[in-house]
Image (cartoon, helix red, strand yellow):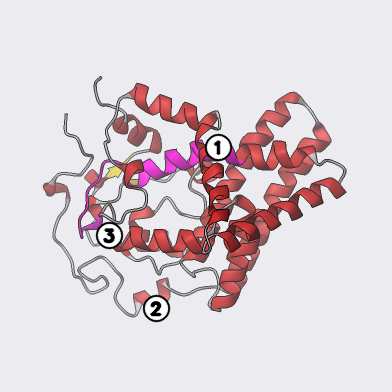
Amino acid sequence: MALTMVPPADALPDVLPSERLLASGKPAPPLRDELRRIAGWHSALTVAGCWAQAIAVIVAAAWIAHPVTWVLAVILMGRSVVMFNILGHEAAHRLLFRHKRLNDEVGRWLLAYPVFQPLELYRRGHFAHHRDELGPDEPDLALYTGYPITRASLRRKLTRDALGVTGYKLMRSMFRGLRGETTRPIVLRILLVQAVLLLAFTLAGRPELYLFLWLLPYVTVWRVFNRLRSIAEHAGMERSPDRRRTTHVVRQHWWARFWIVPYHTGWHLAHHVDMAVPWRHLPRLHDELVRAGWVTAELVYPSYTALWKALSARSA
């Protein structure tokens, strides 16, 4: 079995540039101006909606107070961490608001820091990822290489994530950042936000819910969702200027959009083709790539489960 998931050459037709797309797949003017337009008011509503959903889960769980509801709430709060992180990703790309300071302040204090994401450090590493996917400076190279793996290997990775082993290591790494002159201020700001959240739970009379419905989903459920999403983006692909060789394409279904790829982040090839396109316009860019014949049916996995099955199809 091949040791990569890279599509065959006959699935990668050389059909660009076209009237609407450049050779790289990026939109040409005037389409580029349309797709790169940032709607700040829409972003403000999106951020508010993200917080509203998290608060609603916590309030509902506390009000119903049933064992099944608590379990469901932990899982749903893992989904909320996904949502905060994806919107934090948008802020890292400066695609939430046109005003740079507003974008960064909302991204830091309302999206990234609440879920332990050091936006400034994340931005630096993430842009290295976009400059040269799977290259020598790829920050997540260890996460993507070696696929396909065995089903048992993937099960072990997800089990460690679900039990909090991965989350604990990352939390420990974050606290080590207190030793560095550059990282210390960022870690302190994250801890300040966590203190404010703990205070809010305490003032509501339920401080234990900070641990159970904020911290626990982050170190367990979120880590599972994050691995499943990440490997579905780049696992087993290769370094190449052709993004079709670096990034998977998966048909988007409602359940996946709900749990692991909200805010159109599942249109990941389109995002890598032009990282200046805000999330709400990624489906349009994807449709343009399909219409031009650059994204073929052979490239598209019918579902995430089909892709995960392929990623774990290696024999022992």
CB under 8 Å between callouts 3 and 2? no
Label whose residue precedes the other's in the sequence (1 or 3): 3
Q: Magenta segment, which residues?
A: 218-243
Q: Secondary structure at mark 1?
A: helix
Based on the picture, tell me whether residue 231 belongs to the magenta stretch.
yes
Image location (x, y in percent) of residue 3: 19, 35
State the residue in front, 130 or 67: 130
**Image spot of residue 60 (x, y percent):** 77, 39
Q: Say the numbered circle drawn on residue 132.
A: 3
Q: Nearer the viewer, mark 1 or mark 3?
A: 1
The N terminus: image quadrant: top left
Please name the residue that numbered disc 1 is placed on: 168
Q: Report the amino acid beneath label 2.
A: Asp
Residue 227 percent across, percent down from the top left: 44, 39
Residue at the spot 48% in from the left edge and 47% down from the top edge: 261
Q: Where is residue 135 shown, x and y percent of the image?
A: 25, 54
Q: Are marks 1 and 3 in contact (CB under 8 Å)?
A: no
Question: Is residue 255 shown above or below 294?
Answer: above
Residue 172 picture quarter: top right
Residue marked by disc 2: 33
Q: Which residue is depicted at the point 49% across and 70% down?
A: 94
Residue at 29% of width from left, 75% of height from top? 28
Q: Quadrant of residue 291?
A: bottom left
